[in-house]
């Protein structure tokens, strides 16, 4: 059973589209939306385990240079 999480992403000013292009290359990213408010992007990821959420965040998402801050919300069903 796959584990899902939503990742809220705050980007540097004017860099939202470039971050989206990099996020599209991550296979675990299932959906990307641009949002308004303190965060610029919300991403839905899907992974096999909760541990994989941390790995995706630390190794792939947070390594994108134009990202200032992320907040991760695992789905509990």
Image: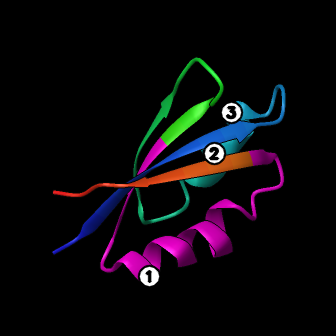
Mark 2 vs mark 1: give the one in front. 1
Q: Is residue 70 magenta?
A: no
Q: Are marks 3 and 2 in contact (CB under 8 Å)?
A: yes
- In the current view of this chain or complex, which residue is farthest to the top? 36
Q: Quadrant of residue 13?
A: top right
Q: Quadrant of residue 74?
A: bottom left
Image spot of residue 72 (x, y percent): 51, 54
CA neighbours of label 1 inside 10 A, class few (<14), some (14 to 19), many (20+): few
The disc placed on residue 51 is 1
From this view, report whether residue 43 is shown above or below residue 40. below
State the SS at label 3: helix
- Judge by depth and name the residue closer to the eye, 61 or 24: 61
Instruction: Determine the residue positioned at 62% across, 42% down.
Output: 9
Image spot of residue 2 (x, y percent): 22, 71
- The magenta segment is 43-68
Q: Quadrant of the C terminus?
A: bottom left
Instruction: Determine the residue positioned at 53% across, 74% down.
Output: 54
Q: Are marks 1 and 3 in contact (CB under 8 Å)?
A: no
Q: Quadrant of residue 39?
A: top right
CA neighbours of label 2 inside 10 A, class few (<14), some (14 to 19), many (20+): few
> Pointer 2: what residue?
21
- Judge by depth and name the residue closer to the eye, 26 or 36: 36
From this view, report whether residue 1 is shown above or below residue 62. below
- The answer to whether 49 appears left or right of 56 in the picture is left
Q: Which mark sits nearer the N-terminus, 1 or 3?
A: 3
Q: State the count of labels.
A: 3
Distance from disc 2 to disc 1, alpha carbons, whole Å, reads 25 Å
Q: Is residue 49 magenta?
A: yes
Distance from disc 3 to disc 2, alpha carbons, whole Å, reads 6 Å
The disc placed on residue 17 is 3
Distance from disc 1 to disc 3, alpha carbons, whole Å, reads 28 Å
């Amino acid at each position: 059973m796959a584990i899902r999480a939503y990742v809220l992403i705050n980007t540097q000013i004017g860099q939202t589209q470039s971050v989206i292009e990099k996020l599209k290359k991550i296979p675990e990213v299932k959906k990307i939306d641009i949002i308004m408010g303190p965060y610029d992007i919300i991403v839905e990821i899907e992974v096999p385990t909760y541990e994989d959420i941390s790995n995706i965040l630390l190794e792939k998402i947070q390594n994108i240079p134009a990202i200032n801050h992320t907040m991760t919300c695992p789905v509990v069903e």
